[in-house]
Image: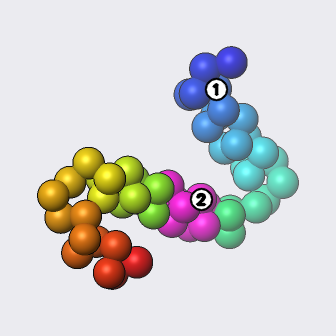
Amino acid sequence: MSKIAIFRELWLFMRMRKKFWMLPLILLIILLGLLLLFAQTSPLAPFIYTII
């Protein structure tokens, strides 16, 4: 199963079950994960960790 298929399944689940309130939560989790990933590879890591 590809990564895109997982997002497609998630979207179909939310659309069929009318669970659109989950979308902001999922986006927030993804953005937080990207911020942490960026913090590991950046020289700004000490400053980002103080924000979180």
Quadrant, the N terminus: top right
Q: For the point 32% across and 53% down, which residue is it?
A: 40
Residue 42 relative to residue 17: left or right:
left
Q: How is the image coloured?
A: rainbow
Residue 37, numbered circle: none
* Magenta segment main secondary structure: helix
The kind of residue tagged 2 is Ile
Q: Residues within 10 Å of mark 2 (few under 14, many from 20)?
A: few
Residue 5, numbered circle: 1
The kind of residue tagged 1 is Ala
In the rendered structure, are the residues bearing label 1 and label 2 in contact, judged by CB atoms less than 8 Å apart? no
- In terms of secondary structure, where does tag 2 sit? helix
Q: Position of residue 31 (x, y in %)?
A: 43, 59
Residues rendered magenta in the picture: 23-30
Residue 26 relative to residue 39: left or right:
right
Q: Residue furthest bottom?
A: 51
Q: CA distance from mark 1 to mark 2?
A: 16 Å
Q: Which of 40/32 is in front?
A: 40
Residue 26, numbered circle: 2
Q: Residue furthest top?
A: 1
Residue 27 relative to residue 13: left or right:
left
- In terms of secondary structure, where does tag 1 sit? helix
